[in-house]
Amino acid sequence: MLGSLPHGAEATQTVTALRILLGDQLTRGISSLRGYEPGDIVLMMEVAEEATYVKHHKQKLVFIFSAMRHFADELRRDGFAVDYVRLDDPANTGSFSSEVARAVVRYRPDMIVVTEPGEWRVLDMMTGWAADIREDDRFFSSRAHFAQWARNRQHLRMEFFYRDMRRASGLLMDGDVPAGGQWNFDHDNRKALPKDVKPPQRVRFVPDAITREVIAMVGARFIDHFGDLEPFGWAVMRDDALEALDHFITACLPRFGDYQDAMKQDNGLLYHAVLSPYLNVGLLTAREVCDRAEAAWRQGAAPLNAVEGFIRQILGWREYVRGLYWLKMPGYAQTNALQASRPLPSFYWTGETAMNCLAQVIGDTRRQAYAHHIQRLMVAGNFALLAGIAPAEVEEWYLLVYADAFEWVELPNTHGMALYADGGVMASKPYAASGAYIDRMSDYCSGCSYDPAVKTGKKACPFNILYWDFLIRNEQRLTSNPRMAMPYRTLAKMEAGRKVQITREAYMFLDSLDAGTEAKPDQQFALEL
Ligand code: FAD
Ligand code: DLZ
Ligand code: SF4
């Protein structure tokens, strides 16, 4: 079925509308398909430029190409005329713009219709297509709605946006009041995972013939990209994504809230939804996922702290970061409030580090193209923040390693939430934490050669040294932030000699990373004063 329409260089037919569908627009109700008439053509393109502008995780490539191919088949079965340009088509020119130009020669359309993309970079390309660019209305909050909400507010804070979105969507509302009498149950959602609690096995999907063909293609063309190609278990069709949603609602949602912030060695999924790739490419809609979660609570199948916590992630955070992205781009990506400039350490690619928390999170990421929020924020992101790694390098890493990564959602989370590179637009304070936080929320430290209780010298957890060094380095920039008052009070009481020791140890540790020779705990005698 794939590529069943001709795509040579010469003009072959005249069509009314050329409807372009991108790899993260795999939703039947998408605005670009609305008003489809026989005689129109839906154009889908696998292009080298999208596959390589960052070296996406191999599983992300398989996921997107296979989901695109399945979606094209589904459209054809339902009577749409689809021209699908495969990556291995010898005539493929390799970019969205050149493929659209080639299709225009083929079809001489009266009009080009497309839904706005998820990245500024692609929107910029689209301005050259003379297309009717339609709104992406798969979100609860349109770009215009968010801009209106943000207008005249001195500080943008997710919590207030979320409350407005609860009212507007009616989710978890009893009339005008929030279900259960409060908007947010976050204080119930910070438990570590007890040893005797065993998270359920997750559904995985056996690759069919289409997926196997894509796996072979990605293995042949993109072998130098990050991450393991197999085993591949992601859903690539809506029916399978719905099965993953069902499984989450019944087996995981009831405990989602309790263990939302927990981390566990050898189980990177815990009770998380693992639905973000499906939401972000459009196999699931945000509305249906939230409705299913709310129904579970109303039927007594899941507690309110879990359901509210889960809906807040989608109705609150997901919508908020998208609004912020479009409000602030393209300048947003250029800010660097903490003047961070260190290169990304090589262990972000290999996972080879004596810091067990990072080795685990990066190992999970390589194996699954997934890590949950706290792993991303408080381990990989926290280290990059404390070490002062250049935002652009960290952002490229996040954009390519996760199956759910598209710039509209990756950038605010990395640039704003994890790195504080926007100087506080997204988060009211830096998410900086020492080893004590990681020790409290995970079982990583018991398998580590560093010790989270040791502050300096041999065996000291690098997160401890770097945490205080971060506060010292950024004192002028952060000390006036009221939410940083407590750590700066503690720092003020610290002896000058101790501060010098911290600065020196941090310098030597970071220097060893730059040189690609991370100082291991048993090599740290030189660091002790
Ligand atoms: P759950 O924890 O089960 O949450 C349910 C859903 O809520 C998710 O599927 C997701 O759609 C939404 N959600 C939760 N938190 C956020 C958030 N902070 N921003 C937006 N949506 C959220 N998410 C992405 O979808 N793509 C990214 O590229 C991405 N990059 C991130 C980078 C960093 C540095 C950080 C700290 C977070 C990032 N996130 C990103 C947000 C979050 O980590 C993922 O959405 C989440 O881990 C996806 O896993 P899940 O489906 O199991 O989510
Ligand atoms: C991420 C991605 C990749 C790797 N490849 C393609 C592709 O070949 N064709 C396509 O239509 N979309 C792809 N995508 C998703 C796009 O990069 C995404 O649509 C833009 O980033 C805009 O959000
Ligand atoms: Fe990570 Fe420090 Fe714990 Fe080791 S001791 S796992 S480096 S937090």
Image (cartoon, rainbow, N blue to C red):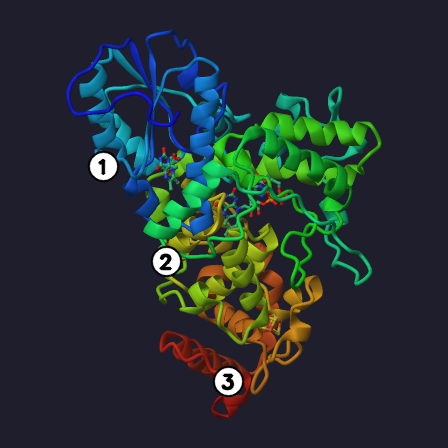
Q: Secondary structure at mark 1?
A: loop
Q: Are marks 1 and 3 in contact (CB under 8 Å)?
A: no
Mark 1 lies on residue: 90
Quadrant location of the N terminus?
top left
Q: What residue is shown at x 51% (from left), y 83% (from top)?
A: 520
Mark 2 lies on residue: 393
Q: What residue is shown at x 80% (from left), y 27% (from top)?
A: 298
Q: Is residue 380 visible?
A: yes
Q: CA distance from mark 3 to mark 2?
A: 29 Å
Residue 501 - label: 3
Question: Disc 3 residue type?
Answer: Gln
Question: Disc 1 residue type?
Answer: Pro
In screen coordinates, is 484 left or right of 247? left
Q: x and y percent of residue 73 in the render?
A: 45, 24
Image quadrant assignment for residue 296: top right
Image height of 494 relative to 182, above or below: below
Image quadrant assignment for residue 13: top left
Most extreme residue toward the right, as rendered?
300
Query: Which is nearer the N-term, disc 1 or disc 3?
Result: 1
Question: Disc 2 residue type?
Answer: Glu
Q: x and y percent of residue 7 in the render?
A: 24, 24
Query: Which is nearer the N-term, disc 2 or disc 1?
Result: 1
Q: Nearer the viewer, mark 1 or mark 3?
A: 1
Q: Are marks 2 and 1 in contact (CB under 8 Å)?
A: no
Q: Secondary structure at mark 3?
A: helix
Q: CA distance from mark 1 to mark 3?
A: 61 Å
In screen coordinates, is 12 left or right of 233? left
